[in-house]
Image (tube, rainbow, N blue to C red):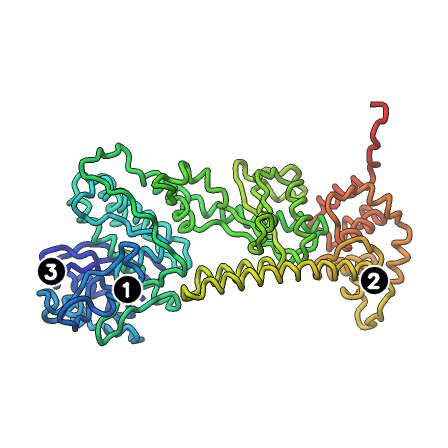
């Protein structure tokens, strides 16, 4: 399927921009044309199959004066962002008969009904509100020629739009433009523009790319699209304005006589985005390795957790962040160095005590550059709300028990650690606030209910912790009935037994009980009675002193160390331990080396 963008001039004496994007989001055509026959000739090969053509020009105009109903409706939402639509009516010469956009759609055989599911369709779009909604702009970008706008401003704003479009490469609806030769030439043309006319020749094609992207966005995410008006009276299709999004303060007017800067302000941002786009595949690989490493650290420490996930920041997200301004000044002087969440890891635990254990583990294993407890910060303000532990770590491990992991130098990662309930609240709140369509009059009640839910979940977190503590202190350790059909000790039976054996230990991951049961089978231990007899030979206090646990180990980790102490090298060489031989060898050395006592004479 092809997604076609047409930035259509109202008259045939001015050029129109044409852009075509394929089903993978790759730009396959970019040009400027003037007359209808030239436009039809270029587009014909792309509209003879499944296609959606987005045209920036009125398609349906029935009113004799004023604005169309769709323009009035759109202006209610977007005029405050400087993205209002100009009035279209049949009193204007361009629309007295069939509008040019409708005429071209008819020649190309395109269905113009926005509710149609025909294979070949056309819709009316408008780039200005689309960019406000897609990129969360505080106001439209001022790249259109207007009296009083100097060349430097027009060029800077047009380059900013190009940076944002290039940043869509890794968005949920990806767009890849910077591999196309025509786009590269267009970038060079804008960067070197010495006259406003040079920019005007470029902006129509850039707007056409926006139109093509809106077509693809509308096709793939129809739930995030708003259709203002209808087919009978005229309509405009645009990405939905995000709930709660507000316009930025109006900037001071820039006068034509102002001296032009010697360096285009947005050039550094664009270069940073291009560099990040080239770097991102490496970051994705490093993220995968870091997820595996953190998982190994947690497993080795015996800390219970639900999941460890990671992501490399998308190019579009990086571009949006790199482009942020505060009081008209760039927020980041060097985005590649100053944006520190390019690699993000998230650890979800069951109870709050394990959040602290994970944070302590990370502090022990990495250089922690920043550590913020967002829940504590919220509570200190007397509120309930977002709760999560955020650590910024330098990926140069202090200790590397996993030889397969080599920490990249001068790389940082943000690690979020939260309970499953904190995670549920954060994800739901984000989805509603940023993707929902809550009427403005309901926002105060929505805020109150989110606060109430946060308080209830904090209470639930505490209760789950108390339940865990109660179960651990009341476990009897009596062997449950055995399943004679399976020689292994069942995971559930083993969990119950270990809760009594190690009453001061935390729970372990459910799959770890089954895993260590397999190790016991390799050792020939198939009953809880045998295991109890085996563990009676272990001096737990001495073993704990030798291991010097720095974070509360789970029950499986305690059993793991006990079996290592009993069987030594034999345990290390079990088939089920093949993936962690180096880790176990380091632990075995620690078990065999007495812990140094402090010298009282010093």
Drawn side of residue 389 relative to residue 159, left or right: right
Q: Position of residue 552 (x, y in %)?
A: 74, 49
Q: Is residue 416 above or below residue 483?
A: above
Residue under label 2, please give it: 475
> Residue drawn at (83%, 39%), measured in percent from left and top?
592
Quadrant showing the N terminus: bottom left
Question: Picture quarter containing residue 29?
Answer: bottom left
Labels 3, 1: front one: 1
Q: On residue 11, which mark appears?
A: 3
Is residue 180 visible from the viewing direction of this image?
Answer: yes
Q: Is residue 288 above or below residue 100?
A: above
Q: On residue 350, which mark appears?
A: none
> Residue drawn at (82%, 33%), measured in percent from left and top?
596
Label 3 and label 1: CA atoms lie apart by 24 Å
Q: Which residue is at the front of the view, 576 or 482?
A: 482
Q: Position of residue 330 (x, y in %)?
A: 37, 40
Q: Which residue is at the front of the view, 591 or 80?
A: 80
Among the two numbered marks 1 and 2 on one chain, the one whose residue lies closer to the N terminus: 1
> Residue drawn at (59%, 51%), measured in percent from left and top?
382
> Residue drawn at (47%, 49%), measured in percent from left and top?
313
Q: Which residue is at the front of the view, 459 or 221?
A: 459
Label 2 and label 3: CA atoms lie apart by 83 Å
Q: On residue 74, which mark appears?
A: 1
Q: Which residue is at the front of the view, 501 or 369?
A: 369
Using a 10 Å C-alpha cutoff, classify the residue at mark 1 as few (fewer than 14 neighbours), some (14 to 19) or many (20 or more): many
């Amino acid at each position: 399927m092809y997604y076609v963008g047409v930035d259509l001039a109202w008259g045939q004496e001015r050029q129109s921009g044409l852009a075509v994007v394929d089903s993978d989001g790759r730009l396959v055509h970019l040009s400027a044309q003037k007359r209808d026959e030239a436009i039809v000739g270029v587009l014909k090969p792309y509209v003879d199959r499944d296609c959606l053509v987005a045209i920036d020009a009125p398609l349906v105009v029935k009113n004799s004066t004023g604005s169309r109903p769709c323009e009035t409706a759109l202006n209610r939402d977007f005029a405050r962002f400087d993205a209002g639509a100009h009035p279209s009516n049949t009193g204007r010469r361009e629309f007295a008969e069939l509008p040019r956009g409708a005429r071209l759609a008819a020649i190309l055989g395109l269905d113009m009904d926005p509710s149609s599911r025909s294979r070949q369709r056309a819709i009316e779009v408008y780039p200005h509100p689309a960019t406000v909604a897609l990129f969360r702009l505080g106001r439209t970008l001022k790249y259109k020629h207007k009296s009083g706008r100097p060349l430097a401003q027009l060029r800077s704003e047009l380059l900013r739009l190009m940076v944002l479009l290039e940043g869509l490469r890794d968005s949920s609806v990806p767009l890849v433009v910077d591999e196309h030769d025509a786009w590269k030439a267009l970038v060079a043309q804008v960067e070197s523009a010495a006259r406003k006319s040079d920019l005007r020749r470029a902006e129509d094609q850039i707007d056409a790319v926006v139109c093509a992207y809106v077509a693809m966005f509308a096709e793939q995410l129809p739930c995030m699209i708003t259709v203002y008006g209808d087919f009978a009276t005229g309509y405009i299709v645009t990405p939905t304005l995000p709930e709660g999004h507000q316009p930025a303060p109006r900037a001071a007017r820039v006068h034509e006589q102002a001296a032009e800067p010697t360096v285009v302000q947005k050039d550094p941002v664009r270069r940073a985005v291009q560099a990040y786009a080239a770097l991102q595949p490496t970051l994705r690989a490093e993220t995968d390795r870091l997820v595996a490493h953190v998982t190994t650290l947690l497993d080795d420490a015996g800390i219970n957790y639900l999941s460890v996930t990671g992501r490399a920041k998308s190019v579009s997200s990086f571009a949006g962040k790199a482009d942020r301004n505060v009081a008209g000044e760039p927020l980041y002087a060097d985005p590649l160095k100053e944006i520190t969440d390019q690699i993000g890891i998230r650890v979800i635990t069951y109870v709050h005590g394990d959040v602290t254990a994970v944070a302590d583990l990370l502090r022990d294993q990495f250089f922690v550059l920043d550590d913020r407890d967002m829940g504590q910060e919220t509570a200190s303000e007397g509120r309930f709300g977002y709760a999560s532990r955020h650590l910024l770590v330098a990926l140069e491990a202090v200790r590397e028990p996993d030889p397969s992991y080599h920490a990249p130098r001068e790389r940082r990662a943000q690690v979020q650690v939260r309970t499953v309930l904190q995670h549920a609240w954060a994800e739901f709140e984000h989805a509603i606030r940023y993707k929902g369509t809550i009427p403005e009059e309901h926002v105060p009640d929505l805020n109150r209910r989110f606060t109430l839910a946060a308080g209830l979940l904090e209470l639930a977190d505490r209760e789950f912790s108390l339940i865990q503590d109660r179960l651990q202190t009341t476990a009897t350790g009596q062997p449950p009935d055995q399943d004679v059909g399976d020689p292994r000790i069942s995971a559930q039976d083993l969990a119950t037994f270990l809760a009594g054996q190690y009453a001061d230990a935390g729970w372990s991951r459910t799959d770890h009980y089954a895993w260590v049961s397999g190790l016991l089978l390799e050792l020939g231990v198939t009953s809880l009675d045998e295991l109890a007899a085996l563990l009676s030979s272990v001096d737990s206090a001495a073993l704990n002193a030798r291991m010097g646990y720095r974070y509360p180990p789970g029950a499986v980790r305690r059993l793991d160390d006990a079996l290592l102490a009993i069987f030594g090298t034999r345990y290390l060489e079990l088939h089920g331990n093949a993936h962690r031989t180096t880790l176990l060898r380091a632990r075995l050395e620690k078990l065999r080396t007495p812990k140094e006592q402090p010298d009282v004479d010093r």
